[in-house]
Image: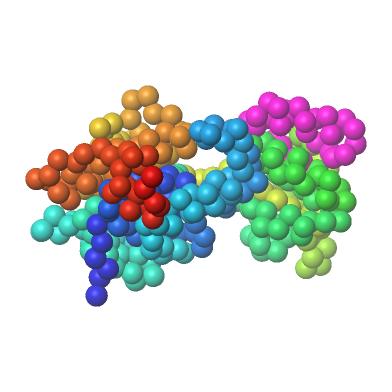
Amino acid sequence: MPIQTDTVIIGAGPCGLFQVFELGLLDIKAHLVDSLPQVGGQCTELYPDKPIYDIPAYPVVGAQELIDRLMEQIAPFKPQFHLGQTVTSLERRDDGRFTLVTSAGTEFDTANVIIAAGLGAFQPRRLKGAEAWENDTVHYRVKDPSAIDGKDILILGGGDSALDWTLELHGRARSLTLVHRREDYRAAPASVSKMKALADAGALREFQGTVSEVLVEGDAFRGLRVKSPDGNFEDLHADEVYVFYGLSPNLGPIAEWGLEIDKRQIPVDTEKFQTSEPGIFAVGDINTYPGKKKLILSGFHEAALAAFAIKSRLNPDKKVHLQYTTTSPIMHQRLGVKSP
């Protein structure tokens, strides 16, 4: 039998998790579906140790710590997670509700859908010609920093992830070389300055160039051949390679649901954060509207207004009153805390 619920949230990143909290305050239950095997989205998958400085009340918080705190915050509402699954079909029924089916065969009968899928069904941009060594010696995320201890490491890329991991790992590896196609970086200037200072001190090597081929000896991976801007080739020997070329944004099946799409993003209104289809909402990086800023903070705000819109949609004949968590006994009951 299909799972009946008020709301299905597609995406379990920070905005999807906070959406659970805002819905829970209004006594709305939610299920979450995410293609990754764990919650956290990009925060967990790509940069768990990355410091974030613009979350209210946190002068600095690690990306994984933020996810852990959000999980703690939403625990009273007992959300149900369906991980390692993608939504393969979404159809509106004659009664106005939606039938949503995942790649694992999980079927939902839901009144509302909230898309909090970040960049969509994102995949890392891959190193061409290295498919045979992926997840063995060629990696697209750092799962265990201790695994590189005493090894010769290459890091590819010029964005925040590449620079952050270069700064994090250089002291653990026997040698570390950062390879970027040009002298200009897309990462935070402070990170670039720290990296260049370490390179000047001999703690790591910085190399400009593009990968031309994988070096192989017999059946063994030996490193990469890199073409420098002046046209010369250099063989960079390594035990392992970490590739941070960024993500390839792909809406995946979302693009087939009949929603208005604008440059791989979903337009929404700024009152309800509803899409062109009533009952389907979008929060976080996947949506767009005039003045949109791709900040976690913005996604939290969007989640709050979407929750009130969904409450009104579920109970169209009742006025939704704003109640403050500080003073409302009803809020305290839902949060599982004692009223003063």
- Which residue occupies 28% across, 31% down? 270
**Quarter of the picture holding the C terminus:** top left
Going 36% across and 48% down the picture, which residue do you hit?
339
Horizontal side of residue 168 vs 12, given as left or right: right
User: Where 105 falls versus 37 (above or below)?
Assistant: below
Q: Is residue 201 left or right of residue 302?
A: right
Query: What colour scheme has been applied to the protein in the rendered image?
Result: rainbow
**Is residue 188 highlighted in magenta?**
yes
Residue 2 visible (yes or no): yes
The image shows residue 147, relative to residue 242, as above or below, that is below
Residue occupying image coordinates x 41% and y 38%: 299
* Residue 32 or residue 129, whichever sits in front: 32
Q: Can you see residue 287?
A: no
Quarter of the image that includes the N terminus: bottom left
Q: Position of residue 276 (x, y in %)?
A: 22, 40
Furthest residue in direction right, as rendered: 202
Towards the viewer: 43 or 201: 43
**Which stretch did the figure color magenta?**
178-206
Q: Nearer the viewer, residue 83 or 59?
A: 59
